[in-house]
Image (spheres, grey):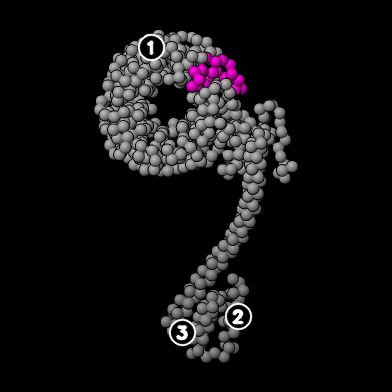
Amino acid sequence: MKPFRQFVGILFWALPTLGISQSQCFKEFLDLGIQAYNREDFQGAFANFRAISGCDQLTANQVRQMNDWIDKANKGYADFMTKARKDAEDARDRALNALDEAQKARDEAQLQAQISEANRLAFIASQEVEKGNGNDALVLAYRAMDLTREHPTPSILLAFGNAIDASYGKTLVGHNQDVLSMNIAPDHQDIITSSADGTVKIWNPEGAMQHTLSGISSYCSKVVLAPSNNRFLAVNEDKKVSIYSMDGQLVASTPMQNEEIATLAISHDGSSFAAGSRNGQASLFDLQGHLIAPLNGHQAPVNAIQFSPDDSKILTVSADKTARLWRRSDGTLISALQDPAGFIYQAAFSPDGSRILLASSDNLAYLYDGNGQLIKKLTGHDAPVVCAALSINHVLLTASLDGKVMLWDQDGNLKATKSAHEQVITRAAFSPDGNYWFTGSGDHTVKIWTAEGTLKAILNQHLGTINDIAFSPDSQFILTASADHTAKLWDLAGNLRMNQDAFQGEVLAAGFSSDGTLLWSCSADGGARFVGNPVVLFTQLTEHPVLPDERQIELYHLNGQ
């Protein structure tokens, strides 16, 4: 400001020599000041306005005008300097942003280069899988995953999953007819398969057959694994339920039943089990094969048996269009669930045991409390209701053959209706955490929905009927088995994570081990397969993965050499 003040002082000193009359003095300096002000020359404007004070005989109005313009010039100068500072800051910010954008561009270019290289490696890995070189495929696919840890593409995810299957998967060969089920012991040391060939086989973790049990019923070939005491149950052709140890030794068996056994269930604590037969009789036994109580009352085959979540009750469902609730402690009847007028397709307890839901062919679903008392008939379906499910979050689901799904609260109040599929719905279930549910249809698709009924993903890569669908225990994956000879692993976003396509027959069943670290599939070609979950295995691998044959293969360089 010092030069500015000096300029003003010189202007005052020079006034007498400027040849300006006092009458013109005010007007001349005012006009010059306004012109400077309009040019945003605020220093010049201030000097001229300030010079007016050197004019003689100023009126009060002229002094007021001078002061007003001086204030305007000062404010204009202050605003100008503020704007100049802001412009400088903006220019600096633009320069910094340009640097940031340049860095982002470099990072994006590097990322795209990594993704491109990872996709190349994944493509080569897929070719190695097709050639039967699972170990090489695993190394390549791992490198692809490692390059894109935060953002792997769907093709990379699939290549890695298929490489895991090719390297770590175990095929169980020994049955000569359809393999119908597989059970994996909690410690993964024993794998049990049952087949339509009338045998049950026990395998070790390496896929080697350890024991074969013959004479298994072809009518009920289901094997039931006891949760905690190294036992499993199987139904024999002689109409007995046999209890075996994991080494295939017969531990006990039930008395011979009057009719073939149609269904089997074990309590959650593993201390008792129930069997239902084709003549309508059901029975409750302990794990030594001793009869605890007969569960009599059905007039047609018992199709399904369930223990309540707390094991205090047993629910039996029969082809006679009835369901019955029994006390587990002594087998006494608690309630004959009233009203269903049609065939009961499915029955389920809620996770807390407070509700029972029946799906019926009379286009209705029936909601009961935990003691079998009817709460409400659920109306609204226009075709037989074939699926009933209850979530841990107290949401109910019913699905019918016309492709419609209806969601209800635990008191039977309608929450949402979805036209889920154009063809029949064959399966529907909630995820273990209750946040999602799936529907499977005759249109060869599976759809994943949020708990509220928003469609999340469509799984549409099967070319045949879908025979089985299962959520993983952590609710993050879905496994599907199809008549197209494949089993497929999917994530909730709909990405295909593994495609098992080596079967020669349709895949009849698929599922997960109890801890979700293994997945399995069973085929009509007499084979079965199990393999580690690729997401779990990725966290266990290092940059040089230890391969199944305990050798290591150097990772391919980025140039592919």
Residue at image position (53%, 41%) is: 495
Asked if the magenta segment contains residue 209, the reply would be: yes
Residue at image position (65%, 45%) is: 120
Residue 10 numbered tag: 2
Which residue type does callout 3 highlight?
Leu
Q: Is residue 155 above or below residue 29?
A: above
Alpha carbons under labels 1 and 3: distance apart: 127 Å
Element at label 3? loop
Instruction: Tell me whether circle 3 and circle 2 mark residues in contact (CB < 8 Å).
Output: no
**What residue is disc 3 on?**
58
Residue 149: in sight, yes or no? Answer: no
The spot of residue 268 in percent (x, y) is 42, 20
The spot of residue 438 in percent (x, y) is 43, 37
Region of the chain picked out in magenta, as a range: 192-213
Q: Is 538 placed left or right of 290 in the picture?
A: right
**What residue is disc 1 on?**
257
Picture quadrant where residue 158 is located: top right
Q: Residues within 10 Å of mark 2 (few under 14, many from 20)?
A: few
Element at label 1? loop
Q: Quadrant of the N terminus?
A: bottom right
Q: Is residue 170 above or below residue 555?
A: above
Alpha carbons under labels 2 and 1: distance apart: 125 Å
Which residue type does callout 2 highlight?
Ile
The spot of residue 326 in percent (x, y) is 32, 18
